[in-house]
Image: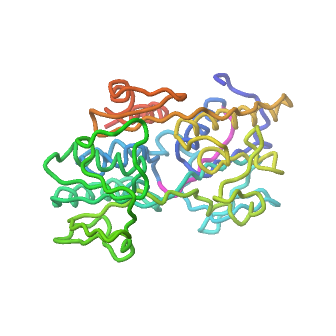
C-alpha cells in the first residue's frame, strides 16, 4: 500500500464520511497512494476519544486529543454535517445544501453518545478543548462524583477521577457488573453500586456541579453527590445514511456488509468501524483494519483484481484504570496490569493518533 496508484483522476473520487479512527486511517492511506479523496466531518479536528475521559479530569490534556484535519489533509478535508446520501446520483448531501460527488464511498460515521465520552457536535478545535476544560473545573469543584454506567467506560471514568483526585469520592452506579477481566481493585475506581439502575436520570443535571444532587435507583437507594457523569448509552451513528440504506440496516442501525466490507447490494460503498455490522468488539484498532481492507478493495476494483476479505478479530480489550493501572484480555488470555499500563494507560494511544496524522503533539 506504500506506492502511488496510477488512476484516471477524473473517474475516481472517494468520499469518506466520518473522521474517526477508521476515517483518518482510510484518508491517510488514500493520500499516500495519491488517490483523489475528500474526508468529511462535522468537526474541524479528529477527536482521539479513547482519551476523552482523562481529558475530563486532567487540566491541559484535552489539547492532546484534538488534531487538525486541515493540517494533515489540506484541501482534501471538508467540514460539514452529512444529512443524506443520494445513491442514484452518487452524491453526499450536506446540511448547507452542497452535494459532494463520489465514485466510491466509505462510511465511517462511528458511534454517538453523551459527553464527555463522546463529542458529537459541529465545533472548532478551540471550542471542543474548552468544553473539556470546563468539565475539569466541574470535577475540581466536586467532592463527590457519581458515574452512571457499569461497563468499561464507567469503570475508566471513575478510575480517572480517583487517580487525579484521590481525596474525592467516586461512586460507580450501574446495572452491569463493570470490569469482567478478573476482579477490579476497589482502590482503582472507588466504590461500586452494581445491579441497580438510576431511576431519576432524566431529572438530574449532568456534568454540572451541584451542592446536593440526589441520585435515586430502582432498588430504592439514594446517593447524594455533587456531580453526575453518564458513561453509557453508546449507539451506532446512523443519521447520515439511515434513509438511503434503510433496507440494509441491522437492528442496531449498523450497515450490513459482505466479507469485503461492501454494503449489501452496493459494490462501490464500504462501511468501516462501528457503523459496519461486523461481529467483533467495537474498537479503534479494528476500525483501522477495516480501513485498510476498504482502501485495498477500492484499489483492487479499479485494477480489476480480486477483492480482499476481512476476517473479524478476536476478543481483545485493554481497560485503563487511571495512568498507572489497568486490566486486559488478548485473544482470551488475561493481560497483567504492567503490560496494560505500558501499552495503554500512560498515554491512551494519543501518540499513535498524532503519528497517523503526521503531526507533533503539543
Residue 132 or residue 199, whichever sits in front = 199
Residue 279 or residue 191, whichever sits in front = 191
Residue 21 or residue 277, whichever sits in front = 277
Q: Residue at x 16, y 71 (%)?
A: 211
Q: Residue at x 57, y 46 (%)?
A: 75
Q: Residue furthest left?
A: 167
Q: Quadrant of residue 202?
A: bottom left
Q: Is residue 41 left or right of residue 53?
A: right
Q: Residue at x 71, y 66 (%)?
A: 243
Place of residue 274 in the rendered image (x, y in percent of width and height, measured from the top left): 59, 48
Place of residue 235 in the rendered image (x, y in percent of width and height, measured from the top left): 54, 58
- Image label count: 0
Report the quarter where the C terminus lies. Answer: top left
Note whether 349 is above or below 205 in the view shown: above
Report the quarter where the N terminus lies. Answer: top right
Q: Is residue 127 left or right of residue 79?
A: left
Place of residue 199 in the rendered image (x, y in percent of width and height, measured from the top left): 38, 72
Q: Residue furthest right?
A: 304
Q: Is residue 24 left or right of residue 202?
A: right
- Specify the segment rendered in magenta: 34-43
Whether residue 264 is in magenta: the answer is: no
Q: Quadrant of residue 111?
A: bottom right
Place of residue 342 in the rendered image (x, y in percent of width and height, measured from the top left): 34, 25
**What colour scheme does the image use?**
rainbow
Q: Residue furthest front?
A: 219
Q: Residue furthest bottom?
A: 203
Amino acid at each position: 500500500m506504500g506506492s502511488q496508484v496510477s488512476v484516471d483522476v477524473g473517474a475516481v473520487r472517494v468520499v469518506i464520511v466520518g473522521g474517526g479512527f477508521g476515517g483518518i486511517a482510510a484518508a491517510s492511506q488514500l493520500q499516500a497512494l495519491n488517490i483523489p479523496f475528500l474526508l468529511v466531518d462535522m468537526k474541524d479536528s479528529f477527536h482521539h476519544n479513547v482519551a476523552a475521559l482523562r481529558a475530563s479530569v486532567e487540566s491541559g490534556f484535552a489539547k492532546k486529543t484534538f488534531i487538525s484535519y486541515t493540517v494533515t489533509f489540506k484541501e482534501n478535508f471538508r467540514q460539514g454535517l452529512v444529512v443524506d446520501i443520494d445513491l442514484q446520483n452518487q452524491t453526499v448531501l450536506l446540511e448547507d445544501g452542497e452535494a459532494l460527488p463520489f465514485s466510491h464511498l466509505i462510511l465511517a460515521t462511528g458511534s454517538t453518545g453523551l459527553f464527555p465520552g463522546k463529542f458529537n457536535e459541529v465545533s472548532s478545535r478551540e471550542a471542543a478543548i474548552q468544553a473539556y476544560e470546563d468539565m475539569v473545573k466541574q470535577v475540581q469543584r466536586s467532592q463527590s462524583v457519581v458515574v452512571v454506567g457499569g461497563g468499561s467506560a464507567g469503570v475508566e471514568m471513575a478510575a480517572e477521577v480517583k487517580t487525579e483526585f484521590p481525596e474525592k469520592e467516586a461512586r460507580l452506579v450501574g446495572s452491569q457488573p463493570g470490569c469482567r477481566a478478573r476482579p477490579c481493585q476497589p482502590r482503582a475506581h472507588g466504590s461500586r453500586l452494581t445491579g441497580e439502575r438510576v431511576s431519576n436520570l432524566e431529572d438530574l443535571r449532568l456534568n454540572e456541579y451541584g451542592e446536593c444532587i440526589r441520585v435515586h435507583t430502582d432498588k430504592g437507594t439514594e446517593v447524594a453527590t455533587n456531580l453526575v457523569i453518564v458513561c453509557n448509552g453508546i449507539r451506532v451513528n446512523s443519521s447520515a445514511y439511515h434513509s438511503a440504506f434503510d433496507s440494509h440496516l441491522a437492528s442496531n442501525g449498523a450497515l450490513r456488509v459482505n466479507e469485503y466490507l461492501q454494503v449489501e447490494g452496493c459494490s462501490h460503498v464500504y462501511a468501516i468501524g462501528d457503523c459496519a455490522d461486523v461481529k467483533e468488539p467495537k474498537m479503534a484498532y479494528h476500525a483501522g483494519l477495516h480501513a485498510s481492507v476498504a482502501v485495498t478493495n477500492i484499489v483492487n476494483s479499479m485494477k480489476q483484481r480480486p477483492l480482499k476479505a476481512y476476517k473479524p478479530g478476536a476478543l481483545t480489550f485493554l481497560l485503563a484504570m487511571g495512568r498507572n493501572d489497568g486490566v486486559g484480555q488478548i485473544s482470551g488470555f488475561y493481560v497483567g496490569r504492567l503490560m496494560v499500563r505500558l501499552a495503554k494507560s500512560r498515554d491512551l494511544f494519543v501518540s499513535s493518533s498524532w503519528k497517523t496524522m503526521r503531526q507533533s503533539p503539543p
